[in-house]
């Protein structure tokens, strides 16, 4: 028998959701201030309207649903999944008011793409977008990369139990420090320090490339927020190709890899345990994956002879490849070039890289290297069991911060999430083909959306069908949250309708 949710459940969910909305409205004040400082009064008004709507809704929810109860696991998961949907809608308000999105659905698409650190975009005339709106596009990536809920509620939640439940709901299943509040603060400390250093480096590189100082540091800040949070937005419509700079490409490769590393690994590196880099199952799996798949991509590119020189093949091929593997989506190619210049073998190698992704507890999406490593270890364990005598006891272990003995439930969980991602990639591909797009292009775009990558082969544009926009929005949302909180929300609505 399915039990109908209690009024108290709805009240607790509404209270904490209200806090998230208030936090989101407060964040909108930053681009508003930037707009006023840059004499962009109409854009500043857009953010004033968005902030007012958010604050009014948030405060009303807090007052109407006031409670002193902590969150249960179910409530925490529902707050997380609803928060990302609400953030998408509210974050889209100033975008839509700018006039650079053809419809509110298009603005919601870019808002979800930003918060989910995907990077697919439907913006029109990006090159003439106001600085404050451009800053907002990248700021929501910075917020989304750390986790919308945990960023806001780590400062607002009464106690750490509820915050931990939402931390898990945002697809972060590893604590770095003893409690989730300190963990969240460490993640922000790492991000802000890297932000300052990355912006300085990118700004200096921009100045040496001939950009004005103010523009160089603004572009540097935006590019860093998108690269470190593996998002892929840039201030210009040509993405990283706009800069025609090998130096910027090299710097962003380093930033993308840093963003794809587990924050827990960052902590141990900062604490001086640098040997963890070469021992950790995630970094080892990432190294082998990059090595093997890029060979596949390079062979495919060589087949087409699109890049006559090895240096050009490496520069163009490796940049798109590492951008896809880290889930960033920065590119130095025009979208149609993936179909016109890359062979099917090269595209398949890139699609696999996008599908696998980076590390758990990082800003990247997709299946992730820890799960790939665990599944492979479980496969080797089963092979050993078949080969060795029946009485043999087979013990498999892996190193992830510490030595861990592989257990069946770990392999089962990793395999279930992997299969769920593969199903999500397939659903988007099927919808694309039903709407008339070729198989490989549909698979490429679907994987990019569901794995929160952001590379496009040309399907994602304002003129694509609304059904495909909604499909990609769902993929970006479900892929970023890694399904558990999404399934919980669906179950909650089913229980509300059919429960007794």
Image: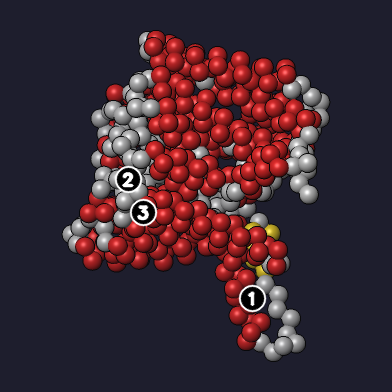
Q: Please say if 242 is above or below 176.
A: above
Q: Residue at x 62, y 71 (%)?
A: 378
Q: Position of residue 407 (x, y in %)?
A: 71, 67
User: Which residue is denoted by mark 2 in the rendering?
Assistant: 459
Q: CA distance from mark 1 to mark 2?
A: 42 Å
Q: Position of residue 348 (x, y in %)?
A: 36, 61
Task: State the residue in front, 8 or 117.
Answer: 8
Q: Earlier in the sequence, mark 1 or mark 3?
A: 1
Q: Residue at x 77, y 30 (%)?
A: 7
Q: Nearer the viewer, mark 2 or mark 3?
A: 3
Q: Position of residue 137 (x, y in %)?
A: 43, 29
Q: Is residue 319 visible?
A: no
User: Which residue is denoted by mark 1 in the rendering?
Assistant: 381
Q: Residue at x 38, y 20 (%)?
A: 98
Q: In terms of secondary structure, where does tag 1 sit?
A: helix
Q: Please say if 460 is above or below 137.
A: below
Give the number of the disc on residue 433: 3
Q: Earlier in the sequence, mark 1 or mark 2?
A: 1
Image quarter hosting the C terminus: top right
66 with respect to 267 (left or right)? right
Q: Residue at x 66, y 39 (%)?
A: 493
Q: CA distance from mark 1 to mark 3?
A: 39 Å
Q: How many marks?
A: 3
- Residue 167 is drawn in which quadrant? top right
Q: Is residue 414 visible?
A: yes
- Work out which residue is located at the far bottom of the displayed protein and give it: 389
């Amino acid at each position: 028998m399915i039990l109908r949710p209690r009024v108290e459940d709805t009240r607790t969910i509404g209270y904490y959701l209200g806090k998230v909305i208030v936090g989101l409205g407060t964040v909108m004040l930053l681009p508003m201030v930037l707009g006023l400082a840059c004499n962009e009064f109409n854009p500043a008004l857009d953010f004033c309207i968005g902030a007012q709507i958010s604050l009014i809704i948030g405060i009303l929810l807090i007052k109407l649903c006031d409670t002193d109860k902590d969150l249960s696991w179910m409530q925490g998961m529902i707050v997380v999944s609803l928060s990302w949907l609400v953030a998408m809608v509210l974050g889209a308000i100033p975008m839509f008011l700018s006039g650079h999105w053809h419809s509110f659905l298009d603005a919601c698409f870019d808002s979800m793409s930003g918060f989910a650190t995907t990077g697919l975009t439907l913006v029109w005339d990006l090159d003439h977008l106001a600085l404050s709106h451009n800053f907002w596009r990248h700021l929501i990536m910075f917020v989304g990369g750390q986790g919308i809920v945990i960023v806001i509620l780590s400062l607002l939640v009464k106690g750490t139990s509820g915050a931990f439940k939402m931390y898990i709901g945002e697809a972060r299943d590893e604590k770095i420090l003893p409690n989730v509040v300190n963990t969240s603060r460490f993640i922000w400390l790492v991000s802000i320090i890297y932000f300052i250093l990355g912006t300085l480096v990118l700004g200096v590189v921009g100045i040496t490339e001939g950009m004005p100082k103010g523009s160089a540091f603004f572009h540097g800040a935006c590019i860093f927020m998108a690269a470190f949070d593996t998002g892929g937005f840039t201030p210009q419509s040509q993405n990283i190709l706009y800069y025609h700079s090998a130096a910027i490409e090299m710097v962003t490769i380093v930033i993308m890899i840093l963003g794809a590393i587990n924050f827990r690994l960052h902590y141990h590196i900062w604490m001086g345990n640098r040997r963890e880099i070469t021992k950790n199952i995630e970094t080892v799996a990432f190294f082998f994956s990059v090595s093997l798949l890029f060979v596949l991509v390079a062979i495919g590119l060589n087949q087409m002879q699109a890049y006559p020189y090895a240096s050009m093949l490496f520069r163009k091929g490796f940049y798109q490849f590492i951008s896809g593997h880290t889930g960033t989506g920065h590119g130095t190619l025009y979208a149609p070039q993936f179909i016109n210049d890359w062979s099917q073998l090269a595209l398949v190698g890139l699609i696999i890289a996008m599908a696998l992704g980076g590390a758990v507890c990082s800003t990247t999406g997709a299946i992730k290297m820890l799960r790939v490593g665990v599944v492979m270890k479980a496969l080797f364990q089963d092979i050993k069991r078949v080969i060795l005598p029946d009485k043999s006891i087979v013990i498999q272990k892996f190193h992830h911060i510490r030595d861990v003995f592989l257990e069946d439930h770990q392999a089962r969980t990793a395999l279930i999430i992997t299969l769920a991602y593969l199903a999500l990639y397939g659903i988007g591909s099927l919808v694309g083909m039903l709407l008339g797009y070729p198989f490989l292009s549909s698979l490429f775009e679907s994987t990019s959306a569901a794995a929160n990558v952001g590379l496009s082969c040309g399907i994602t544009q304002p003129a694509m069908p609304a059904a495909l926009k909604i499909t990609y929005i769902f993929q970006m949302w479900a892929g970023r949250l890694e399904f558990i909180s999404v399934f919980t929300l669906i179950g909650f609505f089913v229980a509300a309708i059919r429960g007794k």
